[in-house]
Amino acid sequence: MVKPSSHALDDLSNFDLKALVLELLGEGYTHRAAAAQFRVSIKFVNDMVLLKRATGSLEAKQQGNGGGHGKLAGVAGWIRGRIKEKRDLTLDELVVELRDESPRVYWRVKLSKDEPHGTEKISPEVHG
C-alpha cells in the first residue's frame, strides 16, 4: 500500500481518490482508517461505498432535475430570446414581461432593507 503525501493528494482527481479509498477498504481497512489515510471525512467514504454498491461505479450521479421539465421549461426559449434581444434586462423586468406572456403564478423574492438580516418578504405576483 502506498502512503500518499499531501502534495500527491492535490494531483488526484475525485474519481482517483475514490478508487484509492475503495482499494484500501478492499484490503480490510475500516472506513475510519481509510478516511484518515486520505484526509477525507468518514461520510465521504460511506457515501462512496454506497455509490459503488448502488451503481457499480464511482462516477458521480447526475445532479439537478435533468433539464426539460423545470418550472420555466415551457418558456425557456422565450426567456433566452428576450435576454438576447435586451442584454441589460433585469430580473424584475423579466418577471413582469413573463407574467404577460404566460398565465401562471410567479413568485419574486424581495429582500427588505427594513427587516433584520436574513429576513425575506415574499410577495406573490399572480397573473391569470
Image: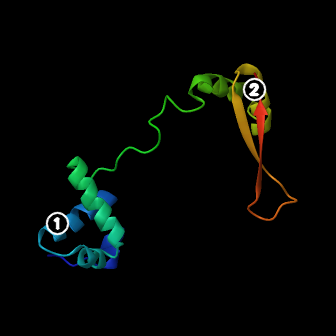
Spot occupied by residue 44 in the image (x, y as percentages of width and height): 34, 66
Quadrant housing residue 26: bottom left
Image position of 74 (left or right of 40): right
Between the residue at mark 2 and the residue at mark 1, the CA separation in whole angstroms equals: 55 Å
Coloration of the structure image: rainbow
- 88, above or below 11, in the image: above
2 or 1: mark nearer the eye = 2
Depth check, front residue: 6 or 106: 106
Which numbered disc flags the more N-terminal residue, 2 or 1?
1
* Residue tagged 2: 99
Depth check, front residue: 20 or 111: 111
Quadrant housing residue 96: top right
Spot occupied by residue 94 in the image (x, y as percentages of width and height): 75, 32
- 112, above or below 68, in the image: below
The tag on residue 53 is none
Image position of 64 (left or right of 114): left
The image shows a total of numbered marks equal to 2
Residue at (17% x, 69% y) in the render:
25
Spot occupied by residue 7 in the image (x, y as percentages of width and height): 34, 75
Instruction: Give, as a three-letter code, the residue at label 2.
Output: Arg
Residue at (16% x, 66% y) in the render:
23
Could you say whether the residue bearing mark 1 is in a helix, strand or loop?
helix
* Residue tagged 1: 23
